[in-house]
Amino acid sequence: MKETTLKSDVVFKGKILKVKVDRVRLSNGKESIREVVEHPGAVVVIPMLGNKVIMVEQYRYPIGKILLELPAGKLDPGETPEECARRELEEETGYKAKRMIYLGKIYTSPGFSSEIIHIFLAEDMEKGENRTDEDELLNVVERDFKDVVKECLNGEIEDAKTIVAILKLWGMKGVGFHEIDN
């Protein structure tokens, strides 16, 4: 089922991503066109202070609304996912984590994008100063983990990376549904 690239044309190259149109040979011998968004990858961090999660409220221009999200960001060239997670956590929230635990990775839209997001749990944190990018305006909020799980399940939280990361941690903790209802 593997596809072989016959020709690749970059049709857009921006600050964050690149768009290619590729001609490919399918495993059955036929040819097809694939439109691909290339992304350098990103991280999402679950910063925990006891039973509290540190989150950010951020306006997202493409959808025209403010979302409640976990701290996250794009990998810089040459940066490891853990280095990026530590940088983004401090930039967006002001916290530094003594323990950063890798929980896995997800592909956001593998049908058309190469974007991968690495998920980290940040524990044993110390507060410092947040240093957001000049074009990044956000509010830092502290939320109860159980409330965040409920909001992921009932649709109040709409950011996919946040939903996946929170529910992954919830599953790893072995917290039952009955405990969320309390």
Image (spheres, rainbow, N blue to C red):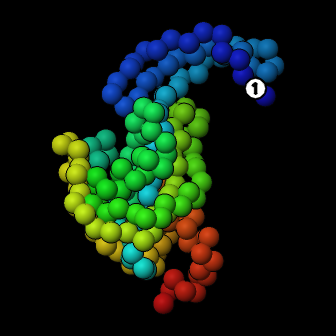
Query: Of 94 and 146, which appears nearest the observer?
Result: 94
Crowding at dot 1, Cα within 10 Å, few <14 / some 14-19 / many 20+, comes out as few
Q: What is the number of callouts on the image?
A: 1
149 or 154, which is in the foreground?
149
Q: Is residue 71 left or right of residue 168?
A: left
Up-down relation of residue 21 to residue 108 (above or below): above
Note whether residue 81 is visible: yes
User: Looking at the image, which residue is at 53% across and 33% down?
Assistant: 113
Q: Farthest bottom residue?
A: 182
Three-letter amino acid code of the residue under disc 1: Lys
The answer to whether residue 175 is above or below residue 123 is below
State the image coordinates of residue 111 (x, y, percent, origin top left): 59, 35
Residue 114 position within the rendered picture, expressed as x and y whole percent measured from the top left? 54, 33
Could you tell me residue 57's position as x and y percent? 28, 60
Residue 42 or 148: which is nearer the viewer?
A: 42
Vertical arrangement, residue 151 with respect to residue 64, above or below? below
Question: Residue 133 sits in which quadrant?
Answer: top left
Q: Residue at x 52, y 17 (%)?
A: 21
Where residue 81 appears, as percent x and y from the top left, is 49, 45
Q: Residue furthest right?
A: 28
Q: Quadrant of the N terminus?
A: top right
- In the shown orientation, is residue 55 left or right of residue 140? right
- Secondary structure of the residue carrying numbered label 1: loop
Toward the front, the furthest residue is 98
Q: Which residue is mark 1?
A: 2
The residue located at (44%, 58%) in the rendering is 45
- Which residue does the image show at 52% across and 55% down from the upper left? 119
**Residue 164 at least partly seen:** no
